[in-house]
Image (spheres, rainbow, N blue to C red):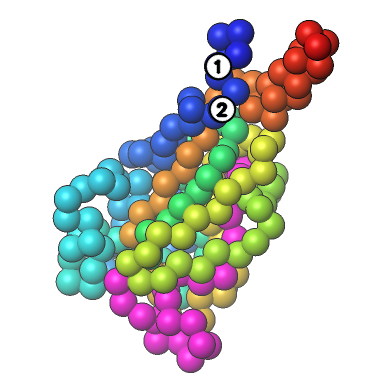
Amino acid sequence: MFCGINLLGTNERLLSFEKPVMSSPLWAYPRWPASNAVKLINESNILQQCTWDNDGSVAIGAGINRFWQVDLQGNFFITKVQVLGFNRPSNDNDGLTTHFKNVQINVCQDDQGEDCTNCNHALLNVGEREWGARLCSENIKGRYIRLLNENTGISNWHFCRVEVYGFDGISYFVLKQHAIRFIEYVK
């Protein structure tokens, strides 16, 4: 804590819980809606819910340029996006056995995904029943988080939960720069 300003990022919080979502067309089976991804994550039976036999995951139909998106209902600095993978392997013969592969994570200003910044410029693969995460650079701010799967192959795109973490207010990066300048001034 420095002059009443939190410089360590402890004001980071979960932003995506039960926020509105939208996605590419879902798989024909209606019990796996896009909104399942923003349910509470510390449920005691989450791994039982996110299975083929139960209805706790998301299933977006196979295809090209598929997306899932959450509206955070405000502009925030995004620090991390993490995803819990589905419990079964995919049917594709591409060497990756997960249903969540080669997914780009974008922080967007608009709900159409046209004004976006890629979070960490890397694709995310998440294994079965595993958490995968991308840390975002220090100054990415936006209202919408859009996961983009350019090609699902022949399999539907399944995943269980998406958690978006961040904070509002002044960027941590800006605060850190001001603190460094102040400390140098005091010396």
Q: Does the magenta stretch include residue 33?
A: no
- How far apart, in angstroms, are the residues tagged by discs 2 and 1? 7 Å
Q: Against 61, is 89 above or below? A: below
Label 2 or label 1, whichever comes before in sequence order: 1
Q: Give the class, few, some or many, for how many residues have Cα within 10 Å of label 1's Cα (few <14, many ≥20).
A: few
The residues colored magenta run: 87-111
Q: Which amino acid does label 2 sit on?
A: Leu
For the point 56% across and 40% down, the residue is 79
- In front here: 181 or 59? 181
Residue 1 got which mark?
A: 1
* Quadrant in the rendering for residue 149: bottom right
Residue 8 circle label: 2
Main SS of residues in magenta: loop
Do residues under tags 2 and 1 come within 8 Å of each other at their CB atoms? yes
In the rendered image of this protein, does residue 66 appear above or below residue 153?
above
Mark 1 is on which residue type? Met
